[in-house]
Amino acid sequence: MLQSEYRIGRNASASDIAWVVPVPDEPVVGLLPPRRASTLFLELTNATYPYVVYPSFTGSDILIIGLFLLGIGGLLVSLVSSVSGWPRWVRDRRRRIVLGSFAALFLVFLKLMSLTFGSGVESGPGGVEILSHEQVGVYDVHVITSTDAGALLRWLRDGGFAYDEENEGAFRDYVEKGWCFVTARIGRDSDAPRDRLVGDGLVAPLVLSSSSRVPIYPLALTATAGRSTELLLYVAGGTKVDCGNRLRTAFANTVRWWPVSSVEDGITPSDFPLPDALERPYLTKFTGTLEPTEMKDDLVFFPAPDNQPVRDTVYAE
């Protein structure tokens, strides 16, 4: 499933969003409604939520709390000590109590400042073959292939995709490997309800099913944008997977409860081929931010050397 965080405003046109996705072979293309996708990713987040470790009080923490209470208490005593009934020695030492209270509060302030600042934590024209052209939900989808990267690039530009000659090298690598390309754009005259186009500001995700036995996440075309990309990837299968340390493994384990119904009940078309591994998979979650120079090669996932569970630990402040 491809869910990209391309946000569009309430008054913007969703047809301004278009995708080109390279795939190893001709895929089956489906669509998941955006709100259903939001639910799915929320359930995945909950299933892979990190352990939270709450802090314990140290001697320094107790000292800060003590000084703070001492300072506040001293100020309160100095304010009400003029009231009759207070011991004379308290009233005679009001000035010292006030100065001592301010000193204690100042020490607390200095300590807090040091904590804040002291640490860093069909056949198409020009050599392009159109394998299929269909309407998938709100998307106008082409699956194309070509033996000529230049012709492929011209076909995309003629269709309104923002690529230029500088990007030909990225396409050439896929062309030489015999890959296909899925292009998707929301029809400009689409009269679909907005909640079929956008959910929580995110466009409806595409779902691709390929016969490739090797999980691959294509990155080379993303690199052509020239900016860093934050990635959150879930890989479901029979075992834990690895990607050569290019991303950090945030979670790895067999999940007892898997939100497969979020996909099955909402995907278009209804006969979309879902893999059997979704029934109760070993789930591996990857996170990270890659720079353009780090995205020249696609992410290839392979079985990890062990099935040792992994789960992030977050230390609460």
Image: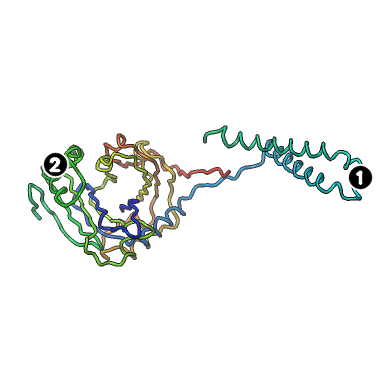
Residue 314 in the figure: left or right of residue 232: right
Residue 226 drawn at (x, y percent): 29, 39
Question: Please, is residue 118 above or below residue 85 in the view?
Answer: above
* Residue pictured at 84% horizontal, 40% vertical: 94
In what quadrant of the picture does the C terminus appear?
A: top right
Question: Please, is residue 196 above or below residue 59 in the view?
Answer: below
- Which mark lies nearer to you, 2 or 1? 1
Q: How is the image coloured?
A: rainbow
Q: Which residue is mark 1?
A: 87
Q: Which residue is mark 2?
A: 149
Disc 1 on helix, strand or loop?
A: loop
Residue 174 drawn at (x, y percent): 19, 41
Mark 1 residue crowding within 10 angstroms, few (<14) / some (14–19) / many (20+)? few
Residue 90 drawn at (x, y percent): 88, 42
Mark closest to the chain's N terminus, 2 or 1: 1
* Residue pictured at 26% horizontal, 59% vertical: 30
Residue 271 in the figure: left or right of residue 314: left
Question: Please, is residue 92 above or below residue 161 in the view?
Answer: above
Q: Quadrant of residue 230?
A: top left
Q: Residue 163 or 39: which is nearer the viewer?
A: 163
Q: Residue 287 or 102: which is nearer the viewer?
A: 102
Q: Going by the picture, which residue comes out furthest to the top?
A: 118
Instruction: Examine the rendering and report whether any part of residue 59 can be seen.
Output: no
Q: Amino acid at mark 2?
A: Ala
Q: Residue 149 or 6: which is nearer the viewer?
A: 6
* Residue pictured at 32% horizontal, 42% vertical: 301
Q: Amino acid at mark 1?
A: Pro
* Residue pictured at 36% horizontal, 45% vertical: 231
Instruction: Examine the rendering and report whether any part of residue 284 can be seen.
Output: yes
